[in-house]
Amino acid sequence: MTSDQTAPRRPGNRRPRDPFQRSATGFVAPGVILVAVLLYLPLLWTAFLSLTEYNGLGDPEWVGFANYVEMLDDPDFLGSVLNTLLWVAGTLLVPVGIGLGVALLTWNLKGGTWLRLPFLIPYALSGIGVGVIWSFILSGDGALDQALAAFGAGDTPRWLVDAPLNTVVMILATAWQGVGVNALLFTIGLQSIPKEPLEAARVDGANGLRLFRSILWPMLRPLTAVVVGLSIVASLKTFDIVQGMTKGGPGRASETLALTMYKETFVNSEYGLGSAIAVFLTAVTLAASVLYLRQQLSSKHGV
Amino acid sequence: MSRIIRTTVLAVLGVLWLLPVYLLLVNAAKAPETFTSKESWLPTDFSLFANIAEAVRLSGLAESAASTLLYAVVSPAIAVVVGAAAGFAIVALRLRHGFAWFVAIFGGTVFPLQMILLPLFDAYSRVGLFDSRLGMVVVYTAISIPFSAFVMRNFFTGIAHSVFEAAVLDGATAWRIFARVYLPMASSALVAVFILQATFIWNDFLLGLVLSQSDTVRPIVTSLAGMQSTYGGAQMSTVLAGGLLVSLPTVVLFLFTQKFFARGLALGQY
Amino acid sequence: MRSRKTPIALAAAAAAASLLLASCGGGGEDDGATTGTLDFYTNKAAWEPDFDELNAQSESDVDISLNTTGYSDAAQYDAFIKQSFRTDKSPGLFTWQTGPSLAELVEEGLVAETTDIWTEAVDQGWIGEDLKAAYTFDGKQYCVPMNIAYWVMYYNKTIFDEQGIAEPTTWAELDAAAAKLAGAGITPYYQTSTLFTFPWFQQLVAGTDPELYNGLATGEVKYTDPRIVEIMETWRDQQDAGWFSDAGSTVDPAVGLKQGDFAMINFGSFFNGSLDGAGMVSGQDYDMFVIPAVNPDLERTPVAVESGPLCVAENSSQKTLGLEYAKWWMSPDAQTAWSAARGDVAFNPQAHVNDPMLEELGTTVAGDGYEAYDRYYEATPTPILTVALEQFGAFIADPGDPLPFLEAIQAEADDYWADQG
């Protein structure tokens, strides 16, 4: 296995006379600088705002941690956190799971490329189209209800009105768009698996689930890390689809953290409170990704 | 599993996946005057082209097309190379504290975009980047870097370090190894990342909304989104037709690059 | 390896330069131009083609044309405009809301005064005095009205004819019409559980007692007031009677009225455009009436009015140009052209309105028996409004005991008024 070949080299042995450290810095710098200037710098301003009272006009007024206290005091904030967790769990289960399934099913299959295409098309659609079409499908007496009625179903659930059903159906709508990308990434991973160990395992009589567990799954780990890592981040930030379909309602029943943040900042002009929620969300996302990535990546590859 | 079962499962699932696309097509083709939401599944008439023309007229998105194409090509192209360079530094050159640098770049993607919009607008209008194509290219590049660095870094971990060492023994410089060995090996991943990011940028709405203003700089989806509004916006089928038109280039892109995705590269052989 | 350093050095230099530049102050100098192209921002993005259409008229009259940028998300738009005051991109002309949000800008000295324009317009008889109040702060005027919309009841004429229902002139007649429709299996009223959740509440409260309605806006009346609770119970009884459409429907309201999902919809008078677009014919397929007051003893029937201001930023480089345009905007020529482009009522009585239905509405509401009041959306301070819209939405989704919903709104109101204290 490729990764094992790199493992025996202990970092300590090569550092003293490593001629490539300087060029390594050069290679990583453009990325770091661009991200720092365009993404982190604005974020610092947000972090500063979270410690102030600011309505978007005039000057921010320093209030210390008052916004964080207010945030944690709000019972609706907890609801928002729970909805967000539901999104994380749902996104890992549905789009990632189906994505892996599609990648495995199309792997080495004649015509697999074309069979994968239906899943990729939704990803290529613009967000507006996706939002409008799913509102259309899930609307009361909408396309889904009409189809169910044709099959004889009488009373259908109120998809977008009753919580937590509305969050569940919105996760499914997101999955519709996201499965293709995950399938594609997993496919790249599968294609990079060397032929020899596979053949060897096949000769040993491994196939189906056992082949998957013993060879494919471990080999897919780097790609799984990518897909799961990106999914965690994306699901914690869920905004567009909820804003497009329920606006977090009815009431605040389907609000996610990103939506709460948006509402406080843009609708209520509570920039300080909105920023505090953003900082909280960022901290959670960063912690989740670092914990996850460190476990997935660094133990294995010593990077 | 036998090939027939696999093909059948995929075909059924694929048809299920295409149903919403079917709904999109059918309803985008209905004339606004006769549109009802009662017969969503049935095609009633074919006014698709009239609807598209109306969408173009209302949103003025024809003017946005060229600049959007520019953003969707240039930014991901730069981002893919920059991201690959970072991955190369961390994995092949074994940059000290590589994981920390990796997290620093990846961290650029963890916070909600909405949070940095206003500071970005503020900074952009002060340095004269507001409503300029350069400004849009720069921000789209920055926003695409974390993803490409993430994928490329992980892709490079699949390449045995002996490949790098062999090249060093041949006397190649780091730059040469990157450009002549690693980039070509990663071409399928580079293209995949490029296409995903190009699609993301093509469909971007938020950054275009806040950082641009004139029709010639504004990206296409931002122009399109203006049609929808409580205050007497366009009709449903017009909006759908516009959404369809805007999505066409990316769908075609996916269709034509399918072969490339499929070819792939067996990294393990190195 | 050396060559790798150049791009990094460049990037670092660019970053440093941008930081340096970023420390420069905001706001522009008024360049004093009175003709040319005026940058205009609006949250009514869908109206962009109408503004463009108007350019022909404004170019020939005052040699100014608008370069319009439309935003479709109202909240994002507000944040963008507020932020732009800090930069040299502060707008020469932009749309805004009346009520507390305009007061906020005036307090900070961010919008240009328009007292002279108003004085002249009132003298010329271009605009009624009653509209002036919403634009007056400390005796001075700011901004000019961009548009005006009355919130009335639209109805599907075919359904009304089939059921033998005439336009109701009293609340009792309206109730009877709704009961008759419901009896025939037709949903009387439209409703939605997202965003526009307030119209029926507004209608019920203002139609019962305008003072009570104003009291809510100023904080003198609590949402938990027994009179408000009673009104909410009326609303719930109507919900229980099946008078309102499916809260989970996302069908475009214009299409909903066309296909008979409901027979009536309470909407702003800009709705004609949507209905025409959906293929209904004004006066033939649909018509409208002013909603009668709940309380028959009221001397004048209250009509909700929405008026969107057109403002000029005080520190804009196009301040003079923006004010020139604002002045022209008030004129009968401009208003005639606007009404033709947009298909809406005009605030200028000397302007000519094409659609006879809208022409008639304008004259009716201007008559003695009617009294305009600010729409709930503009009259209510934003933080209270946000919670109220959410709570009404939750109530619409699951109508029940109104008190918990009202208590939630009042809790926010208490906080807000305490802060203002």
Image (cartoon, helix red, strand yellow):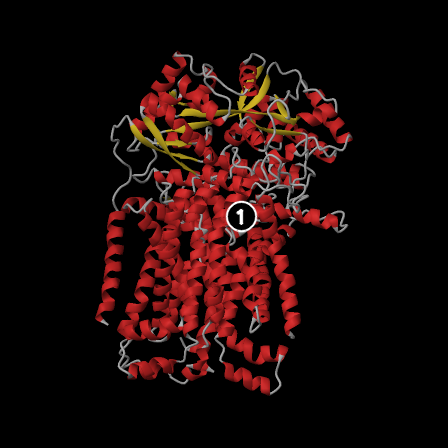
- The answer to whether residue C318 is left or right of residue A106 is left
Determine whether C336 is above or below A15 in the image.
above
Regarding mark 1 in the picture, which secondary structure is present there?
helix
Question: How far across and how far down the image is residue C221, in percent?
Answer: 57, 28
User: What is the count of numbered marks?
Assistant: 1
Determine whether B11 is above or below C168 in the image.
below
Question: How far across and how far down the image is residue C225, in percent?
Answer: 62, 30
Residue at the spot x=70%, y=39% of the render? C400
- Please rate how many residues cluster around mark 1, counting C-alpha atoms within 10 Å: few if below 14, some from 14 to 19, many from 20: many
Question: How far across and how far down the image is residue C18, in percent?
Answer: 26, 51
The disc numbered 1 marks a residue on which chain? A
Q: Is residue C287 visible?
A: yes
Q: Which three-letter amino acid code belongs to the residue tagged 1?
A: Gly
Q: Is residue A268 visible?
A: no
- The answer to whether residue A89 is left or right of residue C45 is right
Residue at the spot x=42%, y=75% of the render? B157
Q: Quadrant of the C terminus of chain A?
A: bottom left
Residue placed under numbered mark 1 in the picture: A129
Viewer-proximal residue among C371 and B191: B191
Question: How far across and how far down the image is residue A38, in percent?
Answer: 34, 54
Res B45 quadrant in image = top right
Viewer-proximal residue among B126 and C113: B126
- The answer to whether residue C180 is left or right of residue C312 is right
- The answer to whether residue B19 is left or right of residue B217 is right
Determine whether C231 is above or below B169 in the image.
above
